[in-house]
Image (tube, rainbow, N blue to C red):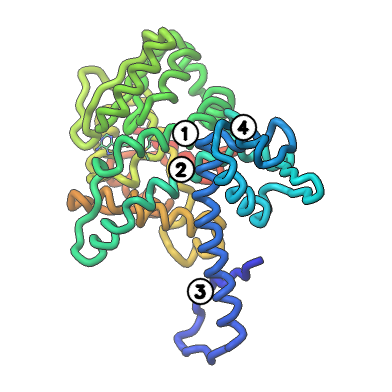
Amino acid sequence: MTTDTRQVATTTDEPSFDASRVEAFAETLFGFYTGGMLTYLVDIGHTTGLFDAAAAGPATSAVLADRAGLHERYVREWLGAMVTGGVFSYEPTTGTYRLPAEHAVCLTGDTSSNLAPFSLLNTHLAKHVGQITQAFRDGGGVPYQAFRPEFTGVMDALNRGGFDEQLVSSWLDLVPGLRDRLTAGVRVADVGCGTGHAMVLLGQAFPASTFAGYDIAEDAITAARREAAEHGVDNVTFEVRDAATLTVDEPFDVVFVFDAIHDQVAPAEMLRRIHDLLAADGVLLAFEPHASSNLEDNVAHPLAPFLYAISTLHCLTVSLAHDGEGLGTVWGEQLAREMLRDAGFSDVTVREVPDEPVNALYVAHR
Ligand SMILES: C[S@@+](CC[C@H](N)C(=O)[O-])C[C@H]1O[C@@H](n2cnc3c(N)ncnc32)[C@H](O)[C@@H]1O
């Protein structure tokens, strides 16, 4: 068990040295390192199918290796970490390993309850630590291009389940009247759409509306077009475009942005472009991390260390790589409201998103 050592100084006096806190903090640090190492093993369990194999029932390491088509010696070592890390239980008399059903919910399946894909993010970002360290010294950053194509697939793996379960059935109803407008037929865009799954789902659910997804990444747009074609969805289009210079012939009624403002090179330009692309009664729906712009307000935020770390290792650096604004993942509500106002949006509300621990929904009217 690690001790929560997070705090904000309330005075400028240097506190007296407390030796007992050294040990507590050392434990905290080893908690970080152990969690980091186990995260790589969760990635391996997810990627190799070991969690699925274990969810089929208790088994020895040989049986598990056989089920997953893997080498037993590796599987046995991995299981050592899984047992001592509290993921599996172990019955020594039979040499049997068991993945508890409650843990299997969090590590297997196609739903957003399966948190195993989040481990992919750690593994992926870790590959760039050396380059980012260099950027601390030299300035600049690591461009988006360096993270592709792997990043595109990681984002898809993280968000697909949530879109499937929540977007059409729940999140749309956070905005009164939106479902009726989509049913009647409106023009909709998704800026920074990644692999475009949200647009495909909305295209299927609302055949009278048209949907356009834009992303600067060619690999993401290729994947998006492929998915739309596979599902025979013909009211959805995808194009490679830069959000900062986006223009269209006809205005949009609704523009979605899912997690794609804070990592922009030119987010203020992007917001101005979106404002200008909206019809007079148009609305921007932006899902962005739910946090304050002030560090001191985020100290007790349970996800704040995760968000600031992702920012350092990805969202901030991809912007700074092009001499961008470098908002970072935790740009926060106060700055978001200010930037939306500066872009011309009049009426901005921020809604909590059900079953979405990371993002808030910004509803901004033109
Ligand atoms: C964090 S990802 C989110 C992707 C997707 N919306 C999702 O929720 O899975 C941010 C996306 O914004 C795209 N992006 C970054 N800068 C862009 C720009 N200037 N114009 C268009 N897309 C951009 C990236 O390529 C990436 O696909």
CA separation, marks 1 and 3?
35 Å
Label for residue 66?
4
- Would residue 113 be visible to someone looking at this image? no
Q: Quadrant of ligand 1?
A: top left
Type of amino acid under label 3: Val
Tags 4 and 2 touching, CB below 8 Å: no
Which one is earlier in the sequence, the residue at label 2 or at label 3? Answer: 3
The residue that mark 3 highlights is 8
Closer to us: 175 or 239: 239
Q: Position of residue 55 (x, y in %)?
A: 68, 34
Type of amino acid under label 2: Leu
Task: Give neighbour class at mark 3: few <14, some 14-19, many 20+ (Cα, 10 Å).
Answer: few
When the figure is inspected, residue 100 is found, relative to residue 307, above or below; the finding is above
The residue that mark 1 highlights is 157
Which one is earlier in the sequence, the residue at label 2 or at label 1? Answer: 2
CA separation, marks 4 and 2?
24 Å
Q: Secondary structure at mark 1?
A: helix
Closer to us: 125 or 216: 125
Tags 3 and 4 touching, CB below 8 Å: no
Which one is earlier in the sequence, the residue at label 3 or at label 4? Answer: 3
* Label 2 vs label 1, nearer the camera: 2
Closer to us: 287 or 73: 73
Q: Is residue 21 left or right of residue 139?
A: right
Which one is earlier in the sequence, the residue at label 1 or at label 3? Answer: 3
Task: Give neighbour class at mark 2: few <14, some 14-19, many 20+ (Cα, 10 Å).
Answer: many
Quadrant location of the C terminus in the rendered image: top left
* Label 4 vs label 1, nearer the camera: 4
Q: Is residue 272 left or right of residue 125?
A: left
Quadrant location of the N terminus in the rendered image: bottom right
